[in-house]
Amino acid sequence: MLPTPKKYFVTAASSEGRSELTAFDNALLKARIGNVNLIRVSSILPPGCQHDPELKLPEGSLVPTAYGYIISDKPGEIISACVGVGVNASDTFGVIMEFSGKCSKQVAEENIRNMVQEAFEARGMELKEVKIASVEHRVEKIGCALAAVPLWY
């Protein structure tokens, strides 16, 4: 069983590749999470988890990560991905939301803000702040837009 993470950062990147998998991998590399093993998690920020934008993840580590991505092979298509971390006013647990779609970065961010707000309302919690990372990408051949919240110990 993994320990409860104590740190996190928000990240977003996009890239092209010669295949869907390499487009995804190249976006991971640009997002600073390409040399770790992602363990996809659902959307709760652990209590006391601190934002650390300079966090360096050890290569090869198993990293719990909430993420969203989209891949397209339609040249000229606009794709976007966004994550948002809702921080609780009482400093207990928070909520992470992910979004990806065939839309602008602005639309993706609007969706995330609404999703975080709804998640806090559903839990009866007061939202203190929202940390967002987003990216928009115009596909050349095969493109990927990715946004993620890696959690660390």
Image (tube, helix red, strand yellow):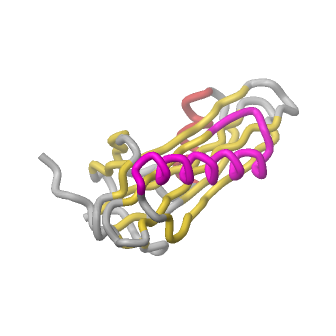
Does residue 6 sit above or below 20 in this rendering?
below
Is residue 120 or residue 78 the one in the foreground? 120
- Residue 140 image offset from top left, x and y in percent: 81, 35
Is residue 44 or residue 35 the one in the foreground? 44
Magenta segment main secondary structure? helix
- Residue 135 image offset from top left, x and y in percent: 69, 52
Image quarter of residue 68: top right
In the drawing, does residue 153 fall left or right of residue 56?
left
Q: Residue at x 75, y 49 (%)?
A: 105
Residue at the farthest right position: 76
Q: Residue at x 32, y 49 (%)?
A: 64
In the drawing, does residue 152 fall left or right of residue 138?
left
Residue at the farthest front position: 124
Q: How many marks?
A: 0
- Residue 100 image offset from top left, x and y in percent: 63, 38
Numbered range of the magenta stretch: 100-124
Is residue 1 or residue 138 the one in the foreground? 1
Specify whether residue 142 is painted magenta: no
Does residue 90 sit above or below 110 in this rendering?
below
Does residue 93 sit above or below 109 in this rendering?
below
Q: Residue at x 67, y 45 (%)?
A: 111
Is residue 53 or residue 117 the one in the foreground? 117
Q: Residue at x 54, y 44 (%)?
A: 98
In the drawing, does residue 29 fall left or right of residue 151?
right
Does residue 81 sit above or below 22 in this rendering?
below
- Residue 114 image offset from top left, x and y in percent: 63, 49
User: Dividing the image into 4 quarters, which one contains the C terminus?
Assistant: bottom left
In the drawing, does residue 80 fall left or right of residue 59?
right
